[in-house]
Image (cartoon, coloured by chain):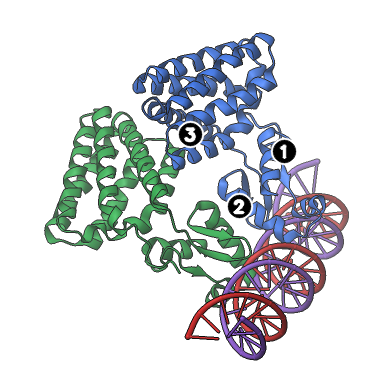
Chain colours: A blue, B green, C red, D purple
Amino acid sequence: MVRTLSDRIVTGALLPGERLDEQSLAAGFLVSRTPVREALGQLAAIGLVERRPNRGAIVAVIAPDRLAAMFDAMAEMEGVCARLSASRMTAAEREELAAEHRASKELVRAGREDDYDRHNAVFHSRLYRGSHNDFLADLASQTRVRLAPFRRAQFRLDGRLRKSWHEHERIVEAILAGEGERAGAAAKAHVAEVSQVSAVFATPKLTP
Amino acid sequence: MVRTLSDRIVTGALLPGERLDEQSLAAGFLVSRTPVREALGQLAAIGLVERRPNRGAIVAVIAPDRLAAMFDAMAEMEGVCARLSASRMTAAEREELAAEHRASKELVRAGREDDYDRHNAVFHSRLYRGSHNDFLADLASQTRVRLAPFRRAQFRLDGRLRKSWHEHERIVEAILAGEGERAGAAAKAHVAEVSQVSAVFATPKLTP
DNA sequence: ACCCGAAAAAGTGTATGCAATCTCAATGCC
DNA sequence: GGCATTGAGATTGCATACACTTTTTCGGGT
């Protein structure tokens, strides 16, 4: 249930600022309000929803400043992960990363945005796991999830798909070459780019 | 109430592995089980307690591997914060940091471990805030809290107080000089040292 | 003496009910 | 006409109750 709600927020089925009424949710999930409340509590702790005392919960709406900070932090974390990946990934991990990256070129050529989005998620996940630090990887994944609502439609932008692929290319090259610093810098630059692009979508659609 | 429980875990009043019985807690706080459950849910989301379905909650007991990963990640995060602090801290922030650091020398000389512990918390907090990235600072603080139960008694060790102060010294020097890379490296080294020292206390006292 | 199994006890997960608080709108006052 | 106020409706927060799972204990058998 936490999973379901989390997905709905991440995929944009629930927009930032949208009200999360306990009763409606309870009715929707065919359970009572108690487990709903518990789920909301957990989502609030994760940071996906915001709980205002006696005033109900809403999908977390993030101030522009904080959003920028989150993207900055994300860039730093991805940089660290990429740097560590360059020195710690096994040969098998490197090959898988490279293979999937090569395969994704076809998605770019065909302009299959949704498929590339899925690939992108896997790519970044590989980067996190490649650090061989599960905690850091979890932290990075979590942050990525929290940013998802604000990064969603970026691939719709003209030429973004191709640019994203080339940025990935630089990261992969550096990792394969075992050059940690360069990989880290490339990953940081990649996220910074995404941050720029995503700023367009940052404005919440509904703020009643 | 989340705060209270969190404090008890961090300060070691509740040890890792210890059982958190909902009824007892409810009785202790003079409330019903419902709010206790909610608090436990939040603490579980933060990672301070572990919830096993139908088997109750315990204070989070962390596997040695994961603990090592957490300290590694902590080192990277502090490194990033220190690097950013070197370039972003205001003159006032730099002065406060340096002033408090200098003042703490007296605590070392007098061997006042508890006071130094408090100073240490403030010092690191300043480092996080100095990054001028609230999200990153929050992330670092949270991780620091989660590690607290395993880092608690480190200052009891012989000479650790003095060593800690000298490590801080290097960080402060680099930040005042505006040398981000050096500050980052010093902070990383500092946490790595703490990690080493804390490994001694990592073994959970009770695993029934 | 040890092990296995069943029943009781303890404890968690969920549902429901009630009190407190907030929202919103209509009304009265300036 | 605009603004504060008050009441009704709606919603959250907490307490209690019950069903279900796990654990413990006690008895019997090997």
Rendered image: mark on residue A14: 1
Q: Is residue D30 left or right of residue C15?
A: left
Please identify the quarter of the rendering in which residue A53 is found: bottom right
Is A37 drawn above or below residue A201 in the view shown?
Answer: below
Disc 3: CA contacts within 10 A as few (<14), some (14-19) or many (>=20): many
The answer to which of marks 1 and 3 sits earlier in the sequence is: 1
Find disc 3 in the rendering and name its residue: A129
Residue for point 74% across, 35% down: A13
Rendered image: mark on residue A42: 2
Disc 2: CA contacts within 10 A as few (<14), some (14-19) or many (>=20): many
Q: Residue B2 appears at what percent x and percent y? A: 51, 61
Please identify the quarter of the rendering in which residue A91 is found: top left
Q: Foreground residue, B175 or B206?
A: B206
Q: Are marks 2 and 3 in contact (CB under 8 Å)?
A: no
Quadrant of the drawing holding the C terminus of chain A: top right
Disc 1: CA contacts within 10 A as few (<14), some (14-19) or many (>=20): some
Residue for point 48% across, 37% down: A137
Depth-wise, is mark 1 or mark 3 nearer the camera? 3
Residue for point 36% across, 46% down: B68
What amino acid type should be assigned to the residue bearing mark 2? Gln
The answer to which of marks 2 and 1 sits earlier in the sequence is: 1
Distance from Cα at disc 2 to Cα at disc 3: 24 Å
Label 2 resides on the chain identified as A
Q: Secondary structure at mark 1?
A: loop
Q: Is residue A96 left or right of residue B190?
A: right
Q: Residue A123 appears at what percent x and percent y? A: 55, 25
Q: Is residue A69 visible?
A: no
Q: Secondary structure at mark 2?
A: helix
Is B33 drawn above or below residue B78 in the view shown?
Answer: below
Q: Secondary structure at mark 3?
A: helix
